Amino acid sequence: MASPDFRRVLFNTIVWLTLVGVGVRIVLGLGLALLLNSKVVAKYRLVTVSRVLLLVPWATPPIVAIVAWRWLLHPQLGAINPALQALGLIDQPIAFLAERAWVWPAILTIVTWNTLPLVTLTFLAALQSLPQEQLEAAEVDGAGHLHKLRWVVLPHLEPAIIVMTLLSTFWTFNNFVYVWLTTAGGPGLYTNVMATDVYIKAFIDGRLGYSSAIGVVMAALMTAFGLVYLRVVAQRELEEAFDGGDR
Amino acid sequence: MAATAERALPPAFAVSIRTGMSLPGELALVALTVLALAFLVYPTAWVILASFRTPETMFAADRFELTLDNYRALLATGFTRNILNSLYLCLAAVLVSTFVSVLAAYTFSRLRFPGKRWIFGSVLLGQCFPWIILVTPLFILMARLGLLNNHLAMIFVYVAVTIPFSVYLLVGYLESVPRQLDEAAIIDGCSRFQVIWRIVFPIMTPGIVATATYAFMLCWTEYLFALAFLTREELKTMPLGLYAFFGENVTEWGHVMAASALTTFPTLVLFLPLRTRLAAGLAAGSVKQ
């Protein structure tokens, strides 16, 4: 359990998949929500079309999202390599899902793409209820855009950000398919995470005991997180909080 | 800053909404929005489009030939079996799971009983657990019961994993049904089951449909349990069939794209009517009123 392999798995799961993955999603989701909520989007009548298009990645099953991105990131057939070559950014095609330097950013791109709409929609919904008087009051007091964002908008979004961070953490930490169907933990065991390790140890190596031990560690971590979640949700009286499932 | 920039707007634009930005600034934001939306739509749109292109020209930027051959070839491989398996498993699981969830949600919402907080808490907590840690114990259980490679076992698993979330969602919907309605029905002599069937069910139908749809999509695209429990070809579901086309050396891209598109169509169609309902649920849950 204390082997270097397992430390690698733990690091991949906690730092790469969960910390970086969830962080990127929340920040981009916030940015996209602010962008789609901006007056410019309303002015050019992009509100309805943007709301509908935003749903597309969410309505795309993860197994299909992975197919699409496996093609996009493909060194010979994909669209990304020729585009980068045409721009003169790279000379040789990159096998994004096979090279250590690229494989984590590539996996996280897929996860982020697939899960961004849910986060963005939640923030958009929260933005709708932002009291306009507060913004106007801040303007009267001479607050610039950044001040308004920091002192009016973000405090209003705080509950939504907390709930989404917690939910995204469960969904991402527990997820199996994103890593399994893109790299199967490879190259080598470079992107192996706890969820895939449980599967590999049990069903490929036949080490049920070791696999169960990893499972128990996962369950313990998520129970701790779950208790925090219940506390936050209960405290804020958000019992009807929407709760979807990742697979 | 807001006041001075307005003057820079040409009159045609100034009529509608004041953005407090210069025209180039606005256009930059519009460009950013369009880019972001293109990034979000492109992969899915491409897969669906590719499924209608001939395998030879699928990856070509210059040639574009439309065909249904991919679908014909796909259905000739036995993928129809996978589709039927998926449909059967998902529909059966969703029916059972929704039935149980409606009863459970009603109980949590309306009845008082000792330990309710704890039981409901554990239902919520049930969602935090990774599915992957259920796989090994369930595998051993199924093996002992002789239920490996058995659709009944898969239905059981799908019912189990969709219940927590369905109950959670339904309890939320039930809170919006006035309690006086079922209290009045009870006084008029209805039994609990009559209340659920005659009063709550009709009012809740949109919520139940939304919940069932989401549960269906969860099963429809489920990969992990199917991978672990179904090894016989004739029992496999669509997601397994789809990934079988990624061979060790050769990938049948035509089959992959057609199968992906067939997996995506139902979720796309089911999702659009759901979106307002889900968004409303999201808003209720995450916005501090």
Image (cartoon, helix red, strand yellow):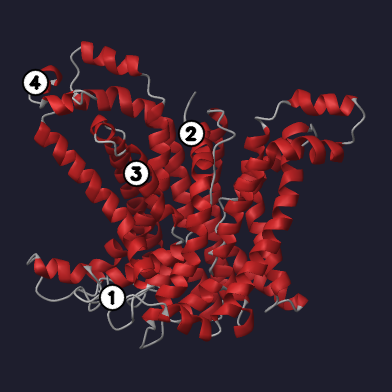
Judged by depth in the image, the label closer to the viewer, 3 or 1, is: 3
Q: Are marks 1 and 2 on the same chain?
A: no
Write down the chain letter for disc 1. Answer: A
| Mark sitting on residue B7 | 4
Judged by depth in the image, the label closer to the viewer, 4 or 2, is: 4
Residue A247 visible? The answer is no
User: What's the CA distance linking mark 1 and mark 2?
Assistant: 40 Å
- The residue drawn where x is 59% and y is 35% is A240
Q: Secondary structure at mark 4?
A: loop
User: What's the CA distance linking mark 4 and mark 1?
Assistant: 54 Å
Residue type, mark 4 in image: Arg
Residue under pointer 3: A49
- Kindly check if marks 3 and 1 are in contact, taking CB atoms under 8 A apart as contact: no
Q: Secondary structure at mark 3?
A: helix
User: What's the CA distance linking mark 3 and mark 1?
Assistant: 36 Å
In the image, is B187 to the left or to the right of A215? right
Residue type, mark 1 in image: Ala
- The residue drawn where x is 67% and y is 68% is B88
User: What's the CA distance linking mark 3 and mark 2?
Assistant: 20 Å
Residue type, mark 3 in image: Val
> Would you call the spot at circle 1 few (<14 residues within 10 Å), some (14-19), or many (20 or more)?
some
Q: Earlier in the sequence, mark 4 or mark 2?
A: 4
> Would you call the spot at circle 2 few (<14 residues within 10 Å), some (14-19), or many (20 or more)?
many
Q: Residue furthest bottom?
A: B249
Give the image location of residue A162, x and y in percent.
43, 37
